[in-house]
Image: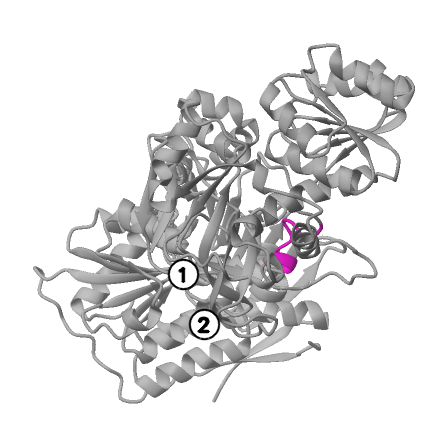
């Protein structure tokens, strides 16, 4: 299928051939009839992409701050790869469309194939021939409403949410500053609600259009016409609400709002304009400044948007989806008319030329629609004192074939997110004797991006085709945590060698399912992405530390930090706890340094936050204490480790330097992993080299399966220990 994309680094726009997205549970696959260009938001994004790197940085200081924090945590090289990987990727455009349901996912019962729906979302209602849309981001189109009009549903919801924030009442007077697409819709919605409207915009054609659509008077904000109209309609008191629907860097809109609002009036920001509030003016009138967040309640909430959890109507009357349905109802009843806003309808194949004309100013438009081929215009848990570590059983284990040195190892990737594209694929793409065969994702554009950047021969959303391809030697599972165990199980049963990013499983049942696949297939060719034991600096430090004769004490401080709001790591119900997601890294590192698997786990948590203390006990009496904290200083190193035994101390400082003190001497050995300041090598490249070697030669996997299982069981036991408040014995199954 085809999709409109943009490269944020170069500014390139393209209509790209990408795989058809899969129809996941909880949503529908929609074939687009019309999609709407947001001439404000999208053109701003297109313009930003054409800026220099300095210009991009100046326009997004919030992103610059994130980059600087990443440098402090991960070092310059890793951050550079991550940032450039994101910039030099195709990103989607679009967020408002109407189309026909082509396929219905499991759990959806309110629409069927062939139904016409309006869809929302900058990740789901894209300028693409097909989109997968979750349940709370689509709504059926009322009978008789034209698809080209229903395509306005999302921008209409944005305007409606802004109006709701202003709480207008019959007979009031409102000022709308900015008469672009959103402003024109706000004018109509206010008029439909019995509010008299004054509009302000420097473009006379937009002022004329707003007056035709119901505004009492409109004019240039720099003239006296707007002030005169407000004075006449309000008896000199000022407007009850001001709606800021303008964009740009001028502070004129907020200054005009203060001048023309009545005492204790409301100012609602819908657009993205400069907001340097003149303190005296806003203070003296005690103006109520409000923000309108996109389409309404539910926006940016993964539980609502992705998991389909609706808000009870008794507590949240107007959600994203209810706003969308309400706007379509107003369209169907003729209370709002969007046809006069349609300046241009372009064929989808002409998308690049259309964007360029808008950007260059050759096409002056309020609203532009893309018309797609074959569109149908006429369609209307309790404490557990003991956790059993599953026994690894193999029946008729398949011997991996030895490959010729001249025959490339063919790899498939399931998932192509940030970690895969910044930490794994750059190493594999440069490795001799490796062929990147197929990339599989649920979203079409991420597969196309990975194919373009790393040279995959194919991109698809069809997992079964990959598992059935006998020419593929190994499958990488680099998806969200909740899918790891099931995808690993399927790949093992298909006879593939598997590399799965941590965690291997989120529950004991999932772990048991993976091991059942090993037993059933005889295929134990599995590696979990516990990369730290492969870090060159830590390998060298362990070698210098040497063998030990007595028990050891290991202390591992993980300064994990706070997650950003909206991170999918916070979706504990679906993706497991944060420690289950990444704690295996630290348990595996400790077990490797102590050369044993833990026999018990004790965990305690600080009340009210995610800070954990995990104590692991080993067969020879050694202990490892992992302090996993989220409340530390962001500038402090993420990982520090001390191993103490036999009069020796090994110190690791965030994979930047390592030291070994021995026999009480004053001197010490120190190694730095790179000449670059704060460069960190956490072992991904060496881990991949060991994995590829095992696939090529048919030799043992880099980490024994029994060790992977023991680490996973210990990680899962942390949650049981927290629930029970007592040590959990890791009993080996018999």
Residue 22 position in % (x across, y down): 42, 65
The reply to whether residue 342 is in sight is yes
What residue sits 70% from the left and 76% below the top? 383
Residue 109 position in % (x across, y down): 60, 74
**Distance of label 2 from label 1 (alpha carbons):** 22 Å
Which of the marked residues, 2 or 1, is nearer the chain's N terminus? 1
Of labels 2 and 1, the one closer to you: 1
Query: Badge 2 is on which residue?
Result: 485
Relative to 681, is 625 above or below?
A: below
Magenta run includes residue 669: no
Q: Which mark is residue 689?
A: none
User: Which span is picked out in magenta?
Assistant: 297-305
What residue sits 20% from the left and 50% below the top? 431
The image quadrant that residue 473 belongs to is: bottom left
What kind of element bears circle 2? helix
What residue sits 36% from the left and 41% below the top? 89
Give 425 or 175, whichever is nearer the viewer: 175
The quadrant the N terminus occupies is: bottom left
Number of numbered discs = 2
What residue sits 65% from the left and 24% below the top? 207
Q: How is the image coloured?
A: one colour
Residue 16 position in % (x across, y down): 31, 47
Query: Badge 1 is on which residue?
Result: 21
Query: Position of 454 compared to 100: left or right?
Result: left
Query: Position of 727 compared to 192: left or right?
Result: left
Q: Residues within 10 Å of mark 1 (few under 14, many from 20)?
A: many
Q: Residues within 10 Å of mark 2 (few under 14, many from 20)?
A: many
Give 562 or 301, whichever is nearer the viewer: 301
């Amino acid at each position: 299928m085809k999709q409109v994309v943009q490269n944020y680094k170069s500014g390139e726009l393209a209509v790209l051939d990408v795989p058809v997205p899969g129809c996941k549970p909880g949503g529908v696959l929609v074939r687009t009839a019309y999609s709407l260009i947001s001439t404000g938001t999208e053109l701003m994004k297109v313009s930003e992409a054409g800026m220099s790197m300095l210009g991009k940085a100046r326009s997004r200081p919030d992103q610059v701050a994130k980059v600087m924090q990443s440098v402090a945590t991960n070092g310059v090289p890793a951050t550079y790869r991550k940032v450039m990987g994101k910039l030099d990727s195709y990103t989607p455009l679009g967020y408002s469309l109407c189309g026909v349901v082509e396929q219905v996912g499991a759990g959806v019962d309110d629409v069927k194939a062939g139904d016409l729906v309006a869809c929302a979302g900058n990740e789901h209602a894209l300028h693409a021939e097909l989109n997968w849309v979750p349940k709370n981001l689509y709504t059926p189109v009322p009978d008789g409403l034209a698809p080209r009009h229903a395509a306005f549903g999302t921008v209409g919801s944005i305007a409606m949410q802004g109006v709701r924030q202003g709480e207008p009442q019959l007979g009031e007077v409102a000022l709308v500053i900015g008469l672009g697409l959103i402003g024109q819709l706000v004018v109509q919605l206010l008029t439909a609600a019995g509010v008299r409207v004054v509009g302000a915009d420097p473009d006379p054609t937009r002022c004329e259009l707003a007056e035709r659509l119901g505004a009492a008077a409109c004019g240039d904000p720099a003239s006296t016409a707007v002030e005169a109209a407000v004075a006449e309609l309000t008896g000199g008191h000022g407007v009850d609400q001001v709606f800021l629907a303008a964009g740009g860097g001028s502070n004129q809109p907020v200054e005009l709002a203060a001048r023309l609002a009545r005492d204790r009036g409301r100012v609602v920001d819908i657009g993205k304009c400069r907001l340097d509030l003149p303190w005296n003016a806003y203070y003296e009138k005690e103006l109520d400044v409000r923000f309108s967040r996109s389409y309404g309640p539910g926006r940016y909430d993964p539980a609502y948007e992705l998991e389909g959890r609706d808000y009870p109507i008794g507590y949240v009357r107007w959600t994203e989806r209810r706003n969308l349905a309400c706007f379509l109802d107003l369209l169907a009843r003729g209370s709002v008319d969007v046809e006069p806003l349609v300046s241009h309808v372009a064929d989808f194949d002409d998308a690049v030329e259309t964007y360029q004309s808008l950007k260059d100013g050759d096409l002056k438009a309020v609203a532009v629609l893309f018309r797609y081929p074959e569109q149908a215009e006429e369609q209307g848990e309790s404490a557990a004192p003991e956790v059993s570590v599953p026994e690894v059983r193999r029946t008729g284990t398949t011997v991996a074939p030895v490959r010729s040195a001249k025959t490339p190892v063919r790899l498939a990737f399931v998932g192509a997110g940030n970690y895969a594209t910044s930490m794994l694929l750059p190493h594999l793409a440069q490795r001799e004797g490796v062929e990147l065969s197929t990339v599989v994702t649920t979203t079409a554009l991420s597969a196309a991006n990975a194919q373009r950047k790393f040279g995959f021969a194919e991109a698809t959303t069809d997992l079964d085709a990959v598992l059935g391809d006998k020419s593929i030697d190994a499958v990488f599972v680099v998806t969200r945590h909740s899918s790891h165990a099931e995808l690993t199980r399927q790949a093992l049963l298909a006879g593939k060698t598997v590399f799965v990013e941590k965690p291997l499983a989120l529950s004991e049942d999932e772990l048991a399912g993976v091991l059942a696949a090993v037993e059933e297939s005889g295929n134990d060719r599995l590696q979990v992405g516990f990369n730290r034991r492969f870090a060159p600096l830590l390998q060298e430090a362990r070698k210098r530390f040497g063998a030990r004769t007595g028990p050891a004490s290991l202390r591992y401080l993980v300064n994990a930090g706070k997650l950003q709001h909206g991170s999918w790591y916070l979706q504990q119900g679906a993706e497991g706890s944060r420690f289950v997601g990444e704690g295996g890294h630290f348990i595996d590192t400790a077990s490797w340094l102590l050369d044993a698997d833990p026999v018990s786990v004790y965990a305690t948590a600080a009340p009210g936050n995610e800070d954990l203390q995990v104590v692991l006990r080993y067969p020879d009496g050694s202990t490892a204490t992992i302090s996993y904290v989220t409340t530390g200083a962001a500038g402090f190193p993420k990982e520090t480790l001390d191993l103490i035994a036999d009069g020796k101390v090994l110190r690791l400082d965030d994979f930047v330097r390592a030291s070994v003190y021995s026999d009480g001497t004053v001197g010490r050995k120190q190694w730095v992993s790179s000449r670059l300041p704060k460069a960190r090598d956490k072992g991904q490249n060496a881990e991949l080299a060991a994995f590829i070697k095992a696939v090529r030669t048919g030799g043992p996997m880099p980490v024994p399966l029994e060790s992977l299982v023991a680490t996973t069981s210990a990680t899962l036991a942390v949650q049981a220990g927290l629930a029970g408040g007592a040590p959990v014995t890791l009993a080996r199954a018999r």
